[in-house]
Image (cartoon, grey):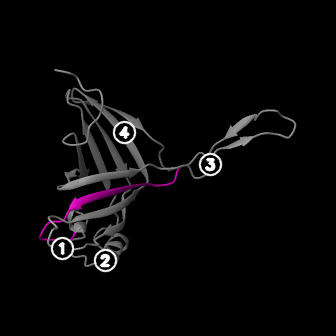
Amino acid sequence: MATSKFRVGGGYTSINFNGTPLLYVDVIRETAPRPVAQAQSIQPMDSAYPIEIAFPAALEAGSLDITFREQWDAEVWAYLPGAGFQNASDLLDVFKAQLTGSALGKDWSVTKVIKNPNGTSRSITYMGIVVVNVMVDEVVNIGSMTFPKSIQMMYLRRQESQHANNSASQLTYPQLAQ
């Protein structure tokens, strides 16, 4: 049998919210943190070439967009286990829960686990998660079989870990200043 070298999506990637698997997820879209400013070449007027490239020492927040298939019993924000959004009626209630209510003080994380068919895996943990939008728009018609709904989140930092034979080594990305 041929050995696969390239990552494929279906069946090999899962997503967890605070350690609990998220069910019925169709799409995970990450927008990686970007530099807070663009790199700039430093070139004095008397120099034929730049003498230095200045680059920022900080990144903006990253974002995750997770698309679920809506279930019968609740809006999509209720699918985040332990987030305290079960009684939310709209996006403003989700914001209020994060600011003053049941979600106050939570340090949420999302972990994406990528499994290699050879048994090894790697994970990317997104820390400092905040829900910033929920797309509950829909069009209902006779041909609609299911309804995709998205939760948009921003995160402060990410950390990658490689797992081989039940051990983990961490590749740590920029940390917040303490």
Q: Which residue type carries mark 3?
A: Gln
Q: Which mark is residue 141?
A: 1
Q: Position of residue 131 (x, y in %)?
A: 35, 64
Is 176 in the magenta? no
Q: Residue at x 26, y 65 (%)?
A: 149
Q: Nearer the viewer, mark 4 or mark 1?
A: 1
Q: Nearer the viewer, mark 3 or mark 1?
A: 1
Q: Which residue type carries mark 4?
A: Glu
- Disc with the residue nearer the chain's start (4 vs 3): 3
- Disc with the residue nearer the chain's start (1 vs 2): 2
Whether residue 60 sits left or right of residue 116 in the image: it is: right
Q: Residue at x 31, y 68 (%)?
A: 135
Is 145 situated above or below 42?
below
Q: Position of residue 150 (x, y in %)?
A: 29, 63
Q: Which residue is mark 4?
A: 160
Q: Is 131 or 4 nearer to us in this picture?
A: 4
Picture quarter with the N terminus:
top left
**Label 3 residue SS:** loop
Q: Which residue is mark 2?
A: 93
The answer for how far apart the CA atoms under marks 4 and 3 are is 25 Å
Callout 2–callout 4 Cβ contact below 8 Å: no
Segment colored magenta = 59-75
Q: Position of residue 62 (x, y in %)?
A: 44, 53
- Disc with the residue nearer the chain's start (4 vs 1): 1
Q: Which residue type carries mark 2?
A: Asp
